[in-house]
Image: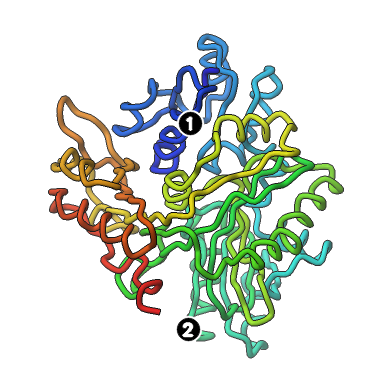
Amino acid sequence: MNILVIGSGGREHALCHALKKSPATDKIYCLPGNAGTLELAECAEIDLKDFTAIAEFCKLREIALVVVGPEGPLVEGIADFLEGKGIAVFGPSKAAAQLEGSKNFTKNLCVKYNIPTAFYQSFTDAKEAVKFIETTDKRLVVKADGLAAGKGVIIPETKAEAIEAVHEIMGGKFGLAGKCIVIEEFLEGEEASFFALSDGKTSIKFGSAQDHKRAFDGDKGLNTGGMGTYSPAPIMTEDMDARVMREIIIPTIEAMQKEGTPFKGVLFAGLMITKDGPKLIEFNARFGDPETQVLMLRLESDLAELLLAAATGELAGKEVRLADSAAVCVVMAAKGYPGEYQKGSEIQGLEAAAKEPGAVIFHAGTKKSGDKILADGGRVLGVSASGKNVAEAREIAYRAIAKINWPEGFYRSDIGAKVINN
């Protein structure tokens, strides 16, 4: 079958990498793709908000399955539109994508269906939010309700910083995403990313990873979309996986059914493993980035078959098989990210890096200009590797990075280090 992957990041390159291995895949297309996906797929420039043009593209190229990478088109209703044209889509409806598109929606669902999460309050009035902060003794987290490119969460150290965060978010820093805010208690524990596939009725475990959100070594600096990750997450034992499925994933899928908004696609649960067990921090309605890179390196199952089954309601009886090995992804970003950064600098040494045994270079914010690869985003490369354990995988990844010549980029040197040091 012909498959269309929508998106331009490292996640989409990793999905193309895995889909290419499937016997069911005839040809892969990518909209708009990047310099890396060009090696695996036919790429085209179409505005991702132009659903009509995307549908026409699908019809002309006889696309049997559309795999939506980023959250934006899902929240805008691309799945509803394409399915209305008879095209199978891996990704939730606009209504179901609210699990990511509105933190307030998700929090209310958790309370209604007893899904474990942090205590919270939602506000559309800054004065009321400030009053709440002033009258609570808990350490708090302040979040924009809507989509903010992974940057709408502020973790203040003091009440004064929390109040400043309220004014910052509701003052327009994240546009309409900050018209409503969620203020919740700060959870103590260890974070983990957990992924499950769903066809609206059946849900199955996909796998786990641990992400590094802060820009610099030692978890310093601003929150980013993710500076690196490793899989599996050691804290996610078989027992913990089963508990997350039982207490969080399955109840959420059942709740969405009861609410008349069945969720199909991949449900990405950002978790805090507390002394009382797993609690939901937030849901994403799509694969994570850079978590997808490490999951795809470990995947032994046929990805095309799994995604089609989820899209068409045929997931019952399927399972995801991941290798017992580990994988690590180290993100190389443009200097200045997640703030202002320059585009257009040349990246050299990628061929040499890709020849490092066990390494795979996933492109994110790149574009091709003649024979050159140029930086074209904030997070630019996901230098990834497989190994028998995290220590071996990270060693290979950093050996590959050493062969890349890109003075305008930076990366963290401690991705996965805490696994080895503990």
Q: Quadrant of residue 218?
A: bottom left
Please tell me how crowded label 1 is: few (under 14), some (14-19), or many (20+) other residues with Cα within 10 Å. many
Q: Residue 336: percent from the left, percent from the top?
A: 26, 58
Q: Residue at x 62, y 82 (%)?
A: 133
Q: Residue at x 59, y 24 (%)?
A: 65
Q: Earlier in the sequence, mark 2 or mark 1?
A: 1
For the N terminus, give its image quadrant.
top right
Q: Residue at x 16, y 55 (%)?
A: 402
The disc at residue 19 is 1
Say above or below: 122 vs 52: below
Judge from the rendering whether residue 76 lies leftward or rightward of residue 355; answer left or right.
right
Give the Cα separation between the discs numbered 2 and 1.
Answer: 43 Å
Q: How many marks?
A: 2
Name the amino acid type tagged 1: Leu
The disc at residue 157 is 2
Q: Residue 9: percent from the left, percent from the top?
A: 40, 41
Please tell me how crowded label 2 is: few (under 14), some (14-19), or many (20+) other residues with Cα within 10 Å. few
Kind of element beneath mark 2 = loop
Q: How is the image coloured?
A: rainbow
Task: State the residue lying farthest toward the right.
Answer: 258
Q: Residue 422: percent from the left, percent from the top?
A: 40, 79
